[in-house]
Each structure stands twice: as C-alpha cells, then as structure tokens.
Image (cartoon, rainbow, N blue to C red):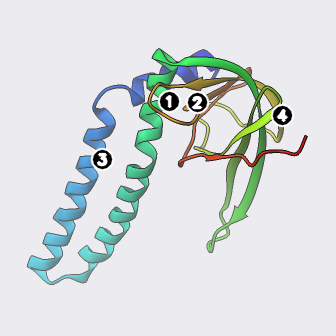
Amino acid sequence: MNVDEQIEELIQTGYGETLNHVRRGAIAITCGLVLAGAFTGNFVFYGIAAAAALICVALWKITPHIHNAARGLKDGMRQEGSVEISILQWTDAESNRHETYRGLVLIDQRPAWQMEFASPGGWQPAEGTYPAQIVFLIGVDWPVAILTAEGLLYPAARPKRAPASPQ
C-alpha cells in the first residue's frame, strides 16, 4: 500500500464518529457481560468482561491519536524533519513474536519528540533515520502524524518531549 492509500484509509477510519461509536459499543458490551454474570451467577461472563475491559482501555487510549492523525492529515500543518525509527522485538508467554515501533522525531536536526507508534498499516518500517513530513494540529502539543516516503506513522500513546541534546 502506498503512502496516499495509507492516508486515505486513515482519514476514512479516523474522521467522524465511527471510532467513538466503537468505543461506546465496547463499553456497552463489557457492561452487558458483567450484568450477564451477575444475573446468571456464571463466572465465565466475568472473565470475558475482564478481557473486554482490556480492549476498552486500549481503544480508549488509541482512538484519540487516530482521530488527531486523520484530522491533521486533512487540515494540519506540515513541517520538514526526520524520524529515527527503532524496533523493539519481544515474545509473549505463548511464544508469539511482537514488534513495537519507537521513534525520535527530529526537527532542524534536533531531537524534539520521543514516541511509540501504533502498528503501521500497509508497510513494514525498518530501523533507521528517514526524512519525513511532521504533521501538527492546532490545539495538540505534539506531532499527530509522521509521513515518510515509505509510509505513515502516528502515536500509540502520548509522546514525550525529547531531552535536549548537548551542542
């Protein structure tokens, strides 16, 4: 998937009320499972509700970033910079391999932001430094999206300011 297709897909996903409805629906399902457990006395419903609650927390944390990235790509300001991508590979208890993408966003050759990226759709980043367009949105203190020639990245959690580098 090329960058323009990734942008279009993110805008379609993140713009509008769809994600908010998904978040509210997940909460309603979790509450329904808790009530089902209370009325039936079956503890299986509580276990499923606990798993659903974890999904709700993940949705609650990531959806504002998806929405901001979609708005930023459509209405935001872009600034030239670069991103240093690092990949952390880890294995869970069931021996499944996972990757976490982290980045150091550089503006004017100086570190500006440290962020963990959501799993990119449509491309597989490699470690390294990439020239990028850094997308900002009025009212949001950090970059909402990073555009490289290979693909699109956006934060999975609230980015942190990078420590000032000695000159």
Which-is-in-front pick, marks 4 and 3?
4
Q: Nearer the viewer, residue 136 or 119?
A: 136
Q: In the image, is residue 87 above or below residue 53? A: above
Sequence-wise first label, 1 or 4: 1
Quarter of the view holding residue 90: bottom right
Residue 12, horizontal then vertical, whole percent: 41, 23
Disc 4 marks a residue whose amino acid type is: Thr
> Which quadrant is the C terminus positioned in?
top right
| Number of residues whose C-alpha sits closer than 10 Å to that of mark 4, classed few (under 14), some (14–19) or many (20 or more) | some
Kind of residue at badge 2: Ala
Neighbour tally class for label 3: few under 14, some 14-19, many 20 plus, Cα within 10 Å: some
Residue annotated with mark 4: 129
Q: CA distance from mark 4 to mark 3?
A: 35 Å
Q: Nearer the viewer, mark 3 or mark 2?
A: 2
Distance between mark 3 and mark 2 Cα atoms: 22 Å
Residue at (28, 31) in percent of width and height: 17
Give whichever of 16, 4 is nearer the camera.
Answer: 16
Mark 2 highlights which residue? 145
Q: Is residue 110 shown left or right of residue 123?
A: right
Instruction: Tell me which numbered mark, 1 or 2, is placed earlier along the sequence.
Output: 1
